[in-house]
Image (tube, rainbow, N blue to C red):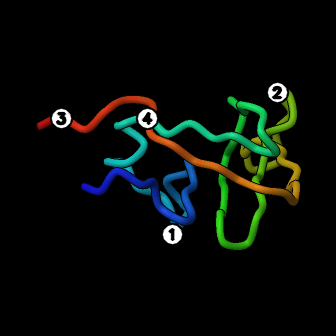
């Protein structure tokens, strides 16, 4: 596994961008220079994050989200195991 997080990642298992191994390792996201802990999905190349909004859910039980544009900097919270 490389030391750079993927260009696009989602936490929902229903998404094609879901990757359990990467999420298990722990990915942090800085959006516009600020650490965000409520990121549901991000895309570095397109420059956006999708953030969950409170505890509100839609009729299918998925968290309500808002998509924001700006610079995205993902990073791994821990170092890879040798």
Please rate how many residues cluster around mark 1, counting C-alpha atoms within 10 Å: few if below 14, some from 14 to 19, many from 20.
few
Please rate how many residues cluster around mark 3, counting C-alpha atoms within 10 Å: few if below 14, some from 14 to 19, many from 20.
few
Residue for point 72% across, 33% down = 36
Q: Earlier in the sequence, mark 4 or mark 2?
A: 4
Could you tell me residue 20's position as x and y percent?
37, 48
Q: Is mark 4 on a helix, strand or loop?
A: loop
* Residue 16, disc: 1
Q: Nearer the viewer, residue 76 or 56?
A: 76
Q: In which quarter of the image is the N terminus?
A: bottom left
The residue to which callout 4 is attached is: 26
Depth check, mark 4 against mark 2: the one in front is 4
Q: Do the residues labelled 1 and 4 touch (CB within 8 Å)?
A: no
Residue 7 in the image: above or below residue 59 = below
Q: Is mark 1 on a helix, strand or loop?
A: loop
Depth check, mark 3 against mark 2: the one in front is 3
Task: Using the numbered discs, state the Cα–Cα distance from disc 3 to disc 1 in whole angstroms.
Answer: 26 Å
Task: Using the numbered discs, state the Cα–Cα distance from disc 4 to disc 2 in whole angstroms.
Answer: 22 Å
Q: Which of marks 3 and 1 is nearer the N terminus?
A: 1
The residue to which callout 2 is attached is: 55
Left or right placement of residue 70 versus residue 81 in this view: right
Q: Is mark 3 on a helix, strand or loop?
A: loop
Q: Earlier in the sequence, mark 3 or mark 4?
A: 4
Please rate how many residues cluster around mark 4, counting C-alpha atoms within 10 Å: few if below 14, some from 14 to 19, many from 20.
some
Q: Earlier in the sequence, mark 3 or mark 2?
A: 2
The residue to which callout 3 is attached is: 81
Q: In which quarter of the image is the C terminus?
A: top left
Residue 54 in the image: above or below residue 32 = above
Q: What element carries label 2?
A: strand
Could you tell me residue 6's position as x and y percent?
47, 61
Residue extending furthest toward the left: 82
């Amino acid at each position: 596994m490389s030391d750079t997080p993927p260009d696009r990642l989602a936490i929902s298992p229903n998404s094609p961008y879901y990757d359990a191994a990467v999420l298990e390792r722990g990915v942090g996201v800085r959006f516009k220079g600020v650490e965000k802990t409520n990121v549901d999905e991000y895309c570095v190349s397109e420059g956006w994050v999708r953030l969950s909004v409170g505890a509100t859910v839609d009729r299918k039980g998925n968290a309500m989200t808002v998509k924001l544009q700006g610079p995205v900097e993902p990073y791994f919270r821990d170092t890879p195991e040798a």
